[in-house]
Structure formats: structure tokens, C-alpha cells
Image (cartoon, helix red, strand yellow):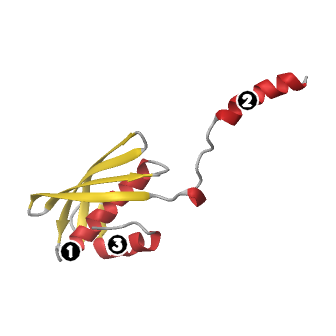
């Protein structure tokens, strides 16, 4: 009886535990920005130790908010984000429009508010 129990538990012991939010210690590896037009910017970010694609998307949004402020503008509008993970390295390729006034659309961000939130969470901007 004990042998059967031991055999059934072995596969579980071989699995790595799923990391929890308390174990989340991200390694932000940098931001590369490309100005596509006066108000159109591409952000390429990479990180390790992400729990999900949302973590790297948040990093890209923080980069967009920081860049918007550096340009002296206050708002950005999210156009798209492509996320990939390979060998534990997460990357995101995100494109935002930036503007001095609140742009039309539903995926807009107030750069000051987002930058402050990123600072509170320890997510770097540019």
C-alpha cells in the first residue's frame, strides 16, 4: 500500500511550484525606444522572472508613460503590444501614440498617473 502511494507522489515532487506574487522578483532588462513619427513610438522591453505576459506589458506601459513625460507631453494611447517568452526571457514590442492632450480612444493613459503607479510598484520607466 505504501509503495503505491509513493509512486503516485513522485510525479508531483518533480514539478516546480508555481511562483506566487510574494515570490515575484522581476529582473527588468531595459527599454529600447524607436520614434516612428513625431507622436508614434515603439517600445521594446525585456525582463525575466515574470509571472505572466501582463507583467511585461505593464513594463512596456511604464516605459511609454516615462517617455511621454520626458517629451514634455501628458498622455499616450496604446495601439498594440506583442509579447513573447523564450527560455525565461519575456519581451514585449509595444506601440503608443503620445500627445500633449488627452487623445481619443479607450486605451489612453495619463502619463503622470501611470508613472507614479509604476514607481510605487518598482517598475522602471525610461
Question: 16 or 105, which lies in front?
Answer: 16
Residue 13 in percent (x, y) is at 70, 35
Q: According to the image, label 2 marks what residue?
A: 10
In contact (CB < 8 Å): disc 2 and disc 3: no
Please say whether residue 106 is visible from this viewpoint. Answer: no
Q: Mark 3 — residue?
A: 115
| Position of residue 72 measured from the top left corner of the image (x, y, whole percent) | 17, 77
- 4 sits left or right of 21 in the view: right
Q: Quote the CA–CA distance across marks 2 and 1.
A: 54 Å
Look at the picture and state if 121 lies above or below 91: below
Q: Nearer the viewer, residue 46 or 68?
A: 46
Mark 1 Cα within 10 Å, few/some/many (few <14, many 20+)? few
- Tell me which residue sits at (91%, 22%) in the image: 1
Mark linked to residue 70: 1
Label 2 and label 3: CA atoms lie apart by 46 Å
Q: Is residue 67 left or right of residue 88?
A: left
**Left or right of 53: which side holds 36?**
left
Q: Earlier in the sequence, mark 1 or mark 3?
A: 1
Foreground of the two, 14 or 106: 14
- The residue furthest right is 1
Quarter where residue 105 is shown: bottom left
Looking at the image, residue 120 sits to the left or right of residue 124; the answer is: right
- Residue occupying the point 49% across, 50% down: 51
Amino acid at each position: 500500500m505504501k509503495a503505491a502511494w509513493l509512486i503516485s507522489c513522485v510525479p508531483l515532487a518533480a514539478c516546480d511550484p508555481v511562483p506566487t506574487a510574494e515570490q515575484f522578483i522581476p529582473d527588468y532588462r531595459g527599454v529600447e525606444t524607436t520614434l516612428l513619427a513625431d507622436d508614434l513610438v515603439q517600445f521594446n522591453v525585456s525582463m525575466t522572472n515574470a509571472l505572466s505576459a501582463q507583467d511585461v506589458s505593464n513594463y512596456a506601459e511604464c516605459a511609454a508613460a516615462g517617455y511621454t513625460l520626458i517629451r514634455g507631453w501628458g498622455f499616450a494611447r496604446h495601439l498594440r503590444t506583442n509579447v513573447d517568452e523564450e527560455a525565461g526571457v519575456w519581451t514585449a514590442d509595444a506601440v503608443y501614440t503620445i500627445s500633449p492632450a488627452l487623445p481619443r480612444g479607450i486605451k489612453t493613459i495619463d502619463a503622470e498617473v501611470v508613472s507614479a503607479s509604476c514607481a510605487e510598484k518598482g517598475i522602471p520607466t525610461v
